[in-house]
Image (cartoon, rainbow, N blue to C red):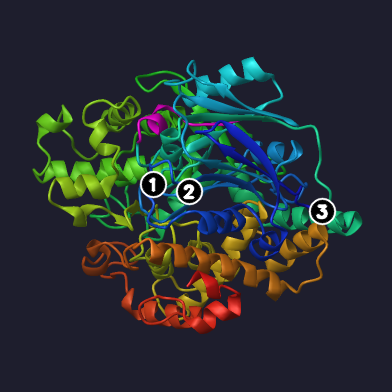
Amino acid sequence: MNAWVGVILRVDLAAKTIEREPLNMKDAHDFVGARGLATKYFCDEVDPNVEPLSPQNKLIYMTGPLTGTGAASGGRFEVVAKAPLTGTIGAANAGGYFGPELKYAGYDGIIFENASDKPVYLYINDDVVELRDAWGLWGKSVYETTDLLIAECGESFKVSCIGPTGENGCLFSGVLNDKHRAAGRGGMGAVMGSKKLKAVAVRGTGSVNVARPVEFMDALVDARQKLKEHPVGGTGLAVFGTQVLVNIINESGALPTHNWRDGGYFPEADATGGESLADNYLVKNKGCFGCSIDCARVTRVPDGPFKSEGEGPEYEAGWSYGANCGVSDLAAICKASFLCNEYGMDPITLGATIACAMELSEMGAIPESDVGFKLRFGDPHAIVNLTEMVGKNEGFGKTLALGSYRMAEMYGHPELSMSVKKQEMPAYDGRAVQGMALEYATSNRGGCHVRGYMTSPEILGVPIKVDPLVTEGKASLLKLFQDLTALIDSLGVCLFTTFGLGLPELAAQYKHAVGTDETDEEILLKGERIWNIEKHFNIAAGVEKDTLPPRLLREALPSGPAAGKVAELHAMLGEYYELRGWDADGVPTDLKNKELGLANEA
């Protein structure tokens, strides 16, 4: 077996049974691994109308063929289930060291079925696989759970787990591994918690073979050198982490501010950016398995009311708690971000939900008595206090745990939720970067930037620079980015490899790892196939059509380089559907299904 190890674990949490089964190699060929392969298993086995927090929803961990091989940044894996926040196919991607360890233990993935009647965790030590009691872990934070399991199982174990928010059904709770790496969006942690599955602890002593070792090593060396030499992947992210984007996006007029109400420019952005983080709180850089970028930040706020330490904040968390909430206190932003990791929840959705609550409160829609204190934009203590309330499932935190759409709907203003398909959009204003507007609207998991990162060409100029304010050409470029990203997620490598690598470099590593002579175009087609099977699931699940919040479509940006612009979705969506081979309603045609070998999915 090359690249894949050929074994799937199937765990019935109700019956407490564990079975090994051969990996479906046809599906592995057609859907690659990780995101694509897990989605194929899921769609074959689960009714699209399943209730996300019911025992009938399944939870799948899946690695990619390049995970653990030594491929450039090849340490990723995927967690797939129907997402409780959105009702879409949920696929959340994480780095760190857990994914490679699972393959070294001899497993490509794990399929969790049904629900346990009591808290358990899955113990994997090569061939020894068993469900163990987790009563002593229930209620513990991500950090505590990880430390306790390593103390119990051994220093060499890698731990993936949920925090208290996953246990309590917070709709945006994540699954975290290595304490700080998160499969963060859509609520995979809530699915895990509904199954009373607290954690997976794994140790592996095996290895992953590649088909053509010499050629694979040549491709790997070439890829690493190109990443090292790239100004974004080799310099910007390495020196300042993802927070380097704060000032770049702000100067482009695309940094959403005050719940996307007051334009794409935040005057105090510099105080919250990567440069300020490095000057004041950075301890050291850190990377995931096989990483040559080391974009993670180990940080410490040494004193003051927000004294804390952890990893991050990443750009999205820094924005959601910063400009989006009108907060310029970087120490408070760090503290709130650290708490998200500790309690196990998505800072993009939580920060955006707090920003939405701030706007609702300022307009009088949320009474002060509901929150417990006066809630206004710019309050650094509010973002920390509310994050703790969600983490502890207390007071107004229970309302915030529903996400911004359900909260805003409760208070009569769903239009103030800056979400797509009920998932909050991240830190790029689609009125100032038109391609990102199209990406948000069409993303298969709701508002998302990492399913087709159009900021790369529109702002960063990678691989080419295009005008962010025009709509021409954006549909074709986005389709390419979405298909390529689906492939990257499924290979088991980091999306940041695209800051230096293109399809030829990624395909070369894949071809020599698995031993295929497919063309680059044939390999990219697998990404398109994955995108379409996700779309089929969402259609069958009754997910709302592709659109944007009214604010982006109707309220022009008041200032900055994109002043006067709205998101011109109507100018791009029809062309996008046509390029995808879908009908005018966004449904894949019979011809497209046949082309991709998905005729049975329709």
As drawn, 50 above or below 178: below
Q: Amino acid at mark 2?
A: Ala
Report the side of 225 relative to 392 (left or right). Answer: right
Q: CA distance from mark 3 to mark 2?
A: 27 Å
Q: Which residue does the numbered mark 1 point to in the structure image?
A: 52
Q: Which residue is denoted by mark 2 in the rendering? A: 81
Q: Position of residue 356 (x, y in %)?
A: 24, 46
Q: CA distance from mark 3 to mark 1?
A: 35 Å
Rendered residue at 69%/19% (across/down): 154
- In the picture of the structure, the residue carrying the numbered disc 3 is 2
Q: Is residue 539 magenta?
A: no
Residue 318 seen in this snapshot = no
Q: Amino acid at mark 1?
A: Pro
Dot placed on the residue nearer the N-terminal end, 2 or 1: 1
Residue in the picture at 70% in, 63% down: 26
Percent of width and height locating residue 193:
43, 33
Q: Secondary structure at mark 3?
A: loop
The amino acid marked with disc number 3 is Asn
Q: Nearer the viewer, residue 82 or 350?
A: 82
